[in-house]
Amino acid sequence: MDFSLSPEHQMVQKMVRDFARKEIAPVIKEYDRKQEPIPFALQRMGELGILGICLPVRYGGQGMDYISLGLACEELEAVDTSLRVAMSVHTGLCSLNLFQWGTEEQKQKFLIPLAKGEKIGCGAFTESGMGSDVAAMTTSAKRDGDFYILNGEKMWISLASKADLAMVTVKTNPSARKASDGLSTFIVDLHSEGVKTGDLHGKLGVRAGATGWISFTDVKVPVANRIGEEGEGFKITMSGFDHGRYTVASGATGIVRACLEASVKYAKTRKTFGKPIAEHQLIQEKIAKMAQDYEIARLLYSQVGWLKNEGKRPTRETSYAKKFATEASFNAAAEAIQIHGAYGFSDEYDVERYLRNSKGAIIYEGSSEIQSLIQAGYALGERTDKPLRCELPAYDEEYWQG
């Protein structure tokens, strides 16, 4: 059992950390206050190869493994959540799902420009009245010759107004015996006639990220753009959530680390009662908990990355990592504010942004409550992972970099 990072992993860490700290950190407060995305962020992430970090070179990626994806997300969210959210929807929900379920023709047409960052992708699954009940979606698609006609609206979609392509799951068979068997997934060009997008405003956190809605009115989507077979949409969507939750978990780990680093720095310089507050035991207790949670979260998401590399589906382990890391990040941010006192209540310091940003991840891509149900299902023996027609390929260095 080897817990060390390879030289390639360390290279990814340094590259992404340098980008986030040197190019994003100096301007993030400005754009968070304006509640606007950083205009150059996605382009730079594409130029640096971050958006396709874990995809094979033959498909436009960097040829790194799945652990590298987690490391990149940790470094990005240690500076701001909006960067990691882009990875979750572009790389996790869209690109990796396409890599797992798409045909070779679809990979050549769509995956290569996504991996290179020439096109931006997103995942469009959530609807306003759906919540955690994925099978209850109402957006529909009806077959009409060589096309499907899409109608409906998706809500709370990250990068909705910035993306060129969307992985969209809709209802194609409303009379299916099981609602989940009536869903199908498509890759949709968001520049198609009948597609409208918009942004949502007034969010608690991730204010430098674009979150919005996508409306489909008689949108013609070629049959060739269907991902998988008709009726496989639920399985494809769940696969996407596995990939997305991995990025959420690793990103949340970055928030824990950022809170720890900020708290240690502040506690060593702030003095009360004639000594640095770092020497007060109750402050030490808070910092110790952050340090402990960081190590646990890092090990949990690293395990998921390793399982992906091995070609083993990590739905259960991803759930563990997602629930623990997101809740730990929220707690770490709250305690970091406490350590900073009144200054922590001001956006003069980053910790208040960490708290606002961390809350969303406890809700989206499967709330903590849903994760508890998943974990209980496995523990009680009521849930097992049945083989999928298309599994995520195991990492093979020769194939990935060839």
Image (cartoon, rainbow, N blue to C red):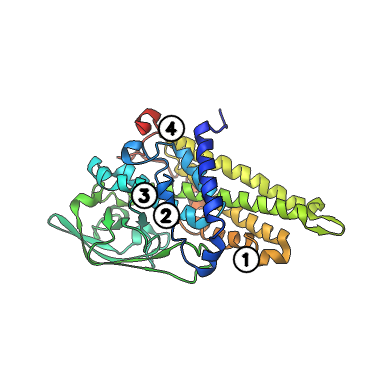
Mark drawn on residue 42: 2
Question: For the residues marked 3 and 2, what is the alpha-carbon distance in whole angstroms?
Answer: 8 Å
Comes first in the chain, label 2 or label 1: 2
Mark drawn on residue 117: 3
Disc 4 packing (10 Å; few <14; some 14–19; many ≥20)? some
Viewer-side label of 2, 4: 2
Q: Nearer the viewer, residue 356 or 303?
A: 356
Disc 1 packing (10 Å; few <14; some 14–19; many ≥20)? few
Q: Are marks 3 and 2 in contact (CB under 8 Å)?
A: yes
Question: For the residues marked 2 and 1, what is the alpha-carbon distance in whole angstroms?
Answer: 24 Å
- Circle 1: residue type: Asp
* Residue 207 in picture, x, y percent from top left: 50, 65
Q: Secondary structure at mark 1?
A: loop
Disc 1: which residue:
347
Question: For the residues marked 3 and 1, what is the alpha-carbon distance in whole angstroms?
Answer: 32 Å
Question: Which residue lies at the image location 61% right of the left edge and 43% below the top edge?
Answer: 296
User: Is residue 364 visible from the viewing direction of this image?
Assistant: yes
Comes first in the chain, label 3 or label 2: 2
Disc 3 packing (10 Å; few <14; some 14–19; many ≥20)? many
- Left or right, 117 with respect to 352, comes to left
Question: For the residues marked 4 and 1, what is the alpha-carbon distance in whole angstroms?
Answer: 43 Å
